[in-house]
Amino acid sequence: MKITLEEVAVFLAVVDTGSLTAAAEHLGQPVSTTSRLLARLEEKLQTTLLRRTTRRLDLTDEGCNFVHDARQIVESVRVAEDRLMERRGRLSGPLHIDASSPFMLHVLVPLLPGYRALHPGVDLVLHNNEGFIDLLERRVDLAIRIGELKDSTLHSRLLGQCRNRLVASPAYLARRGTPADAEALLSHELLGFSQPEVLNLWPVQRADGSVVRIQPTLLSSSGETQRQMAIAGMGITYLADFMTARDVAEGRLVEVLPQATLDKPRPVHAVYHQQSAVSVRIASMVNYLAQAMQAPEAEWAAYVPPVASKIAGLMEAVR
């Protein structure tokens, strides 16, 4: 008796989520169905794939050997289906995208109408998370990450770079004065992050060459919250250009200490789980973002400078 795709999908869901209960929830089916399909797969293969204990499920040696082939099977079928739909001009299915709230609001959301016009059959599901998440656990297909990447289990493609600047409202600076150097900055109302602490290390050079680690007057977990507080005249903050460039251009915010702030661009990556093949839906979104982010007419193109040579390679690599 031959194994079925449904049985293989159940096996992978159990491996990725760590339990029958979580896998059943992920697949939207009863735990009894999940357990029965997994047992049937093991019976057909005449081997034990998962070792069950009272607390967890662990892969056996046979399971470890099978899981790679299983992923290739499922991904190949999914990619074949996506490409068939694409050739028919009907790319469809869900695409879960995760990004921080500021990047989602200021960059992704303005670009999504253009993507929807190209692929109306793709159902976009947007997730906002301020920190890094497990893509498999959260059922996320594609995430946008700013900063250096550390997770080696993910594929990544460089989309561009973003820069941060110190900004404050004209009203705040009129009330408190404009700091002339790093030492003067420390006497001001400073808007910082509650976590991670590294975000409160601002690249503003002191007289001895070191940089400033601020003690925030007001703490927030969200850059967008800090932007709103800065506009309201509550202090000085250090935020990405894609959030504040329009505010600076329209006079709501003013750059502070540009001559003392080190230019430290951070990479913007599209990341997705490392599988044997890339979903056409994921590829379509990465391609679209790469093109949109380098388009000179894009409102925020100046805020996130494109890396043209790497983007050119990306356009082929994600296919």
Image (tube, helix red, strand yellow):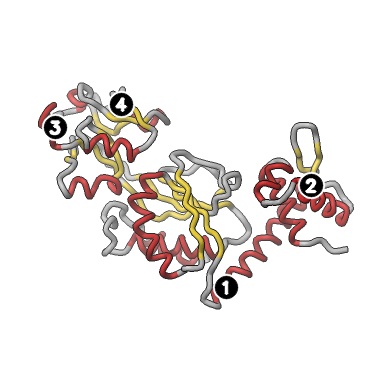
Crowding at dot 3, Cα within 10 Å, few <14 / some 14-19 / many 20+, comes out as some
CA distance separating discs 4 and 1: 51 Å
**Element at badge 1?**
helix
CA distance separating discs 4 and 2: 50 Å
Taking the image as shown, residue 66 lies to the left or right of residue 136, namely: right
Q: Which residue position holds label 3? A: 173
Q: Nearer the N terminus, badge 2 or badge 1?
A: 2
Q: Nearer the N terminus, badge 3 or badge 4?
A: 3
CA distance separating discs 3 and 1: 56 Å
Residue 109 in the image: above or below residue 149: below
- State the residue in front, 93 or 147: 93
Q: Nearer the N terminus, badge 3 or badge 2?
A: 2
Answer whether labels 4 and 1 touch (C-beta < 8 Å): no
Question: Residue 85: which disc?
Answer: 1
Q: Residue at x 38, y 63 (%)?
A: 113
> Three-letter amino acid code at disc 1?
Met
Q: Residue at x 19, y 45 (%)?
A: 248
CA distance separating discs 2 and 1: 33 Å
Q: Residue furthest front?
A: 30
Q: Nearer the N terminus, badge 3 or badge 1?
A: 1
> Three-letter amino acid code at disc 3?
Leu
**Element at badge 3?**
helix
In percent of width and height, residue 39 lies at 84, 50
